[in-house]
Image: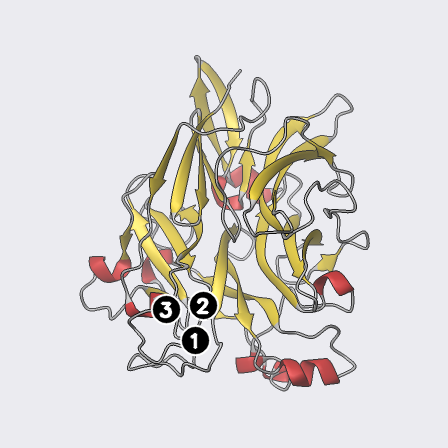
Amino acid sequence: MAGLVVGMSILLCGGLAHAILDNNLKVVDLSDLDGPLPLDVEATTQILWQTEDWEHSSYNNPSWPSGGTDSVGYPTVVKNDHGQNPDGKYYLYYAHHDPMSGIGCAVADSIEGPYAKIAALDPSRADSKVLTVPNYNPSGPNPGDPSHYSSPCVVWNEQEQLWFMYFHYFNHYHGAWTSDPNYPGYGHQMTALATCPDLSSHNWTIWTDPTWGNVSVWDIVPVLPTTAEPWINSASSYNAIQRLVSGQWLAFVRGTSYAGEARVGFATSTDGRKWNYFRQNPVITPEGIGERGGAYRPYFVGYLGKNGGGQDEYLVVWGESPTAGDVPAAVYGYTTDFVNIRRDPRGFASWKPGDGLVSPWREGDKLYLFAGKYVHRMALPIQ
């Protein structure tokens, strides 16, 4: 596939050359591991802080921008080495998960940072957002308005020569969505798509279509919508998107039911725009291979190479929380089809994930895992 051929680089380890997948396709290459992925990391560094007004929650907070919760995080990282005007820098997109979150951006010269928010790099900017919720008012958002954009996931699309950003939005028109027989589920939160040809411009365009305007706020096209299935009838959000070795797009999906339960499933696409949910969804549940009964979260996918039968094998990493409290822990699994997943018998990883996806990045024998406000550095056992 064209994207795979373009998206490879040579890694030198122990004098041997190993062609690794492009990190910007979001499936991290682990095919040269000498043993399983470690459960621990060697270092953790904070990379994000709450520093701008919009990063404070406005909901039920008439004193905004003072007060409000601090949920800044939800990072996704790419390297600007594709598209127009590549500068070779690392672009970190982030958000919070409270009104009025938008999507922010910070930039670094190296993968570990430090990451500088774009408003600090360009004093002419009022803030570091690259996507702003239309209802946002810089003089003081409505404390009763739940509008937000959150949980960005950025992937390079070689075929369209565009950066794709997936993010979820609160759909004010969920009542119209629910009452329309053509749109299944409740449509409370769904995943949208924005595109950009030049990361350094910070100009992103949300995919909209006025034919959606009666059921989806601001004419947003919900590329990963809710469905009639109970596990995802309220929200399709916090999704991790990646390109597999075959070139197929894979969405690692977090569905939320009307009752508030969060479960994990998958969807595939040939172009990153039109998606098909697995009929076997949800794939990862407490009733299946899960061990805890609380919220389940998709984190990231790694490529492990060909197995003994010549099939592409993948690492799947997800999160589980106990029913009594939302304290997620990361779990590893192994699969060739994303339906039959074998749970790693070693138990939970010791590094701390977060509420959203985990954005992986490989450089040499180090794996960097961006989660919440932090980046974890893991030493990889290389052949």
Whole-number angstrom distance, CA of label 1 to CA of label 3: 8 Å
Q: Residues within 10 Å of mark 2 (few under 14, many from 20)?
A: many
Q: Is label 1 in contact with label 3 (beta carbons under 8 Å)? A: yes
Report the amino acid beneath label 1.
Tyr
Q: Give percent across and percent down for residue 161.
A: 49, 55
- Dot 1 or dot 3, earlier in sequence: 1
- Image coords of residue 146 (percent x, y): 49, 76
Q: Amino acid at mark 3?
A: Gly
Q: What amino acid type is highlighted by mark number 2?
A: Asp
User: Few, some or many C-alpha atoms within 10 Å of disc 1 (few <14, some 14-19, many ≥20)?
Assistant: some
Pointers 1 and 2 in contact (CB under 8 A)?
yes
How far is the residue under mark 2 from the one under mark 3? 9 Å
Query: Mark 3 sits on what residue?
Result: 68
Residue 285 can be seen in this image? yes
Q: Quadrant of residue 73?
A: bottom left
**Label 3: how many residues lie within 10 Å, few (<14), some (14-19) or many (20+)?**
some
The answer to whether residue 272 is left or right of residue 89 is right
- The residue to which callout 2 is attached is 98
What residue is disc 1 on? 59
Q: How many angstroms separate mark 1 from mark 2 (CA)?
A: 7 Å
Q: For residue 133, which quarter of the picture? A: bottom left
Local SS, label 3: loop
Q: Is the Cβ of the residue at disc 2 closer than 8 Å to that at disc 3?
A: yes
Extreme residue in the front direction: 324
Q: Which part of the image, by quadrant, shows the N terminus?
A: top right
Residue 301 at least partly seen: no
Of the image marks 2 and 3, the number of the one nearer the N terminus = 3
